[in-house]
Amino acid sequence: MNLDALYSELTLKTKAKLVMVVLDGLGDIATREQNYLTPLEAATTPNLDAIAKDSAQGRMIPAAPGITPGSGPGHLGLFGYDPLEFQVGRGVIEALGLGMDLRPGDVCARANFATLDAKGIVTDRRAGRIPTETCERLVGLLAAKIKKIGDTEILIRAGKEHRFVVVFRGKGLEGPLTDADPNREGFPVPAVQARDENSAGQKKMAGLIADFYKAALPVLAGEKPANGFLMRGIAHQPHIPLFEDRYKLRPACLAVYPMYKGLAQLVGMKKMEGPQTISAQFERYLAEHDQYDFFFIHYKYTDKAGEDGNFAAKKKAIEDFDAALPILLRKKPDVLVVTGDHSTPCSLRGHSWHPQPVLLHSKASGSDKLERFTETGANLGSLGVFESRFLMRLMQANALMFDKFGA
Amino acid sequence: MNLDALYSELTLKTKAKLVMVVLDGLGDIATREQNYLTPLEAATTPNLDAIAKDSAQGRMIPAAPGITPGSGPGHLGLFGYDPLEFQVGRGVIEALGLGMDLRPGDVCARANFATLDAKGIVTDRRAGRIPTETCERLVGLLAAKIKKIGDTEILIRAGKEHRFVVVFRGKGLEGPLTDADPNREGFPVPAVQARDENSAGQKKMAGLIADFYKAALPVLAGEKPANGFLMRGIAHQPHIPLFEDRYKLRPACLAVYPMYKGLAQLVGMKKMEGPQTISAQFERYLAEHDQYDFFFIHYKYTDKAGEDGNFAAKKKAIEDFDAALPILLRKKPDVLVVTGDHSTPCSLRGHSWHPQPVLLHSKASGSDKLERFTETGANLGSLGVFESRFLMRLMQANALMFDKFGA
C-alpha cells in the first residue's frame, strides 16, 4: 500500500497546534579548532535547555545520504515532501527568492547578463559581475520593452550583480528545457530545447525563449559589457499536493526572507507579512495562534553565519533565538519542533550533507533524558537518524492525529 | 534484485534454535511524572541484566514512522512481513481473537448488533451495548437458523457485548467489500459492494452478505433492542508466504491469547495449546525444543497494563517475565530476542508509534556494552533504529543462516 495514502487514511482532524521552528543551516560539525564544540554546543541556551529534558531528539537526512541540499529540497523535506520526487527548478527558486508572486503554470528562468563578441561568442558568462544598480537599469530597459510575447505575459526582475529572473505567464507552458548557456566561454549561446520531445508545452516554451532573445538582444546591443545574457533552470512550478489537504492542518508561514515565504507558498501555506525579527515572528504567532494549526517559523541567521564561516556569529544567532523563545512558549504549542533544513558547518562555509539535529517536544514525545539540545546529544536520541520527509508525520503522531493502523 | 529473493537464495538450513519473546506493548516513554523512568527501566530484572552485556540492542519501527499499529500489523512485522504489503482485515483479526480456526479462502466480517426503527433506520449502532449473554443467545439463534447459504458454510461466533463475527467458508469468495454500516445513526444499513468491480469473488461475496441479511433479519425481528446488525471489515485472509518456506525454520507458537495464536497460524506456525503462564510457556519450550527451530513466545500483560495506564502493573509484568526467564535459559537458544510488537506507553493508555526496544543475544551479536535492557540504552545500541520486518533477517544472520552475498 502507498504510504502517503495510508497516512491520509489514518489522519484525524484535531485541535492540536503544531510549530516547526527552522534555524536555517543549524547543524554543524565539531572540530579540533573549535575545541570540539559545535556552535549549538558552545551557545548558552537556557530556554532550549529547559525543554530539552522533556523532548525526543534525533538527526535528519535532508534528501539522501551524502547529498547536500539547497534551500528548496531542504524545506520540501521538512514540509514532508520527498525532495527527490518534488523537484523545484532553479528558476522557480530564484523567482521565489526575489519575492515574485508565482502562479500555477508559470515558467521561470534564472538569467545572467553576459558579454558577447561580434560573432555572438560568449566572452564573459557574468559580464564582469556588473553592479546590482546596472543590472536593475538593464532589467528596467528590458521590462519596458518586452511585456508580452503573443499571449504570454513576461515578468522580469533584477537580482544581485549580473543575475535576473524571467517569468513567463501564459497558457499551456511547460518546462523543463535545456539551458541557453554554453557553460563556458568561447562558445555561442545555444538555442534551448524541450527536454521531452512529445511535450507541446515545452515546445511552445522553447519558441517563447527564442522570441525573447530576438526581442531582448537589440535592447542590449549598445551595452558594455552586458550586451547579452544566458538563461538556465527553465522550469514550471511542480504540482505539489497542498499542505492543508495532505495533513489536515491550516498552515501559516512566518519567514522574513522571500525565498522561504516562496517555498511555503508553493505548498499552500499562508504567508504572514510584517515581522522582521524572531521576537516579532513569535509575537505574531501568539496573535495568529487561533487562526492556524501549523506554524512554520524560519530563522535565517544561523545559515548566514555558517556560510561566512563565522563561528561566533552562528553561536550568537542561536543565543538570540533562544532569548526570544519564551515569547513563543507563552502559548505553548502541543507539538514543538526545533531543527534546521540542513547543516551549514562554519568550517565548510556552506551547506552540507551532515544530518541536522532535531528536537521534538510534546506530551507524547517522552524524554530522552538529554539535558541540552546538541548534535552530539541528538545522536543518542530516540528518534534515531531518519529522512526529514518523515518529520511532519512524527509531528502529526505526537499531536495524536493518527488513528491506529489495523486491529 | 528483490530483497526477499536474495534472502531466500542465501538462506542455509542449520540446526540453530531461535526464540523470539514478545512482551506485548513493551515499549514506553520516560516522563517527568515517573521520575524519567520507563517501566522497563524501573523494573528489577536481574536475569535480563545478566544477558544484556552480551547482547546487541536497538529500536524498531513497527510499520512506518509515526504509525501506531494494531496487533495484526505489529506481529506481521515481527514475523518478517511488511505490514503495509500484507494487510489483515479487521474481520479476520476479530475471528482470530475469538479463537476461530480459519482456513485459506475464508471471508470474515466483524458485526455489531444494532437497533433499527420500523423503516430500517439505524437508531443505535451498538444496540445499547447489550450484555454478552444476550449476544450469545442471539448468535445461538442465528447460528441454528443459518448454517449454509447456497454452497457456502456460515460460521457465527459471539464476542463481547454487542459484537460478533461471521465467517463465510466456500468456493471463490473474496474481499474486501465496503461496509454494511452507515457509520452514524439516522441512516439505513447500506448494501455492501465489491471494492474491485472486476472481482467475481467480491461480487459473489456481496451477494452472500445480502442473502445473509435476508435470512438473519427475520430471526431478530422481535428482539429489543437488538433487532438488526451492521457488518464491517469484510475481507479474506491475506495470502501470506509460509514462515517455514520463507525462513527454512520449523516454527512453533507459544501464546495464551487466541488473537496471537491466530496471527501465528496465519503465517503457518504450529500452535501449542495448554500453557497459561509465562513459566508454563517456557517449560513447554523446553519440552518442544527438539521438534522446532523457531519459537514465538507471546506475553500479554505488559500491553494490558499499558492500556490501563498502570505503571506499577507494567513494571510488575516485566519483573514476572524476568523471574521466569531462567526456565527458558535452561536450554539456551542460539539466538534469543526479547522485544515488543509496539509500544504501549502507560501515559498514553494505548498503543503508540514510538519505536520499541529490542535485545538480540547470540554468540555473534557482539556486546553493546550496555548493563541493562532499556529504551534509553537501546537508543545507543548497534542495531540502530530499523523497521521490525527486518528483525527475522537479523535473527537468521545471528544464527549464521545466511551465505555470503557475492564474492
Image (tube, coloured by chain):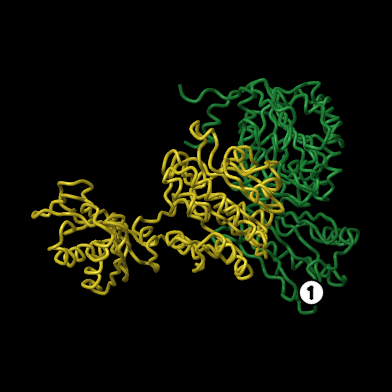
Chain colours: A yellow, B green
Q: Chain of mark 1?
A: B
Location of residue B190 with respect to A108 vertically, above or below: below
Q: Nearer the viewer, residue B252 or A187?
A: A187
- Residue drawn 52% across the image and 63% down it: A253
Give the residue drawn at x 71%, y 68%: B183
Percent position of residue A54, x then y: 70, 48
Instruction: Where is residue A364? Give x, y as percent.
Output: 71, 52
The crowding category of the residue bearing disc 1, from other C-alpha atoms within 10 Å (few below 14, some 14 to 19, many at least 20), is some
Horizontal and vertical percent position of residue B284: 83, 28
Image height of B334 relative to B383, above or below = above
* Residue A366 seen in the current view: yes
Horizontal side of A160 relative to A222 (left or right) equals right
Tally of numbered discs: 1
Instruction: Identify the residue under disc 1.
Output: B123
Instruction: Examine the rendered structure and indicate whether residue A86 appears above or below residue A59.
Output: below
Q: Residue at x 67, y 49 (%)?
A: B88
- The kind of residue on which mark 1 rests is Thr
Given the current orientation, which residue lies at the most extreme bottom position? B119
Nearest the eye: A192 or B116: A192
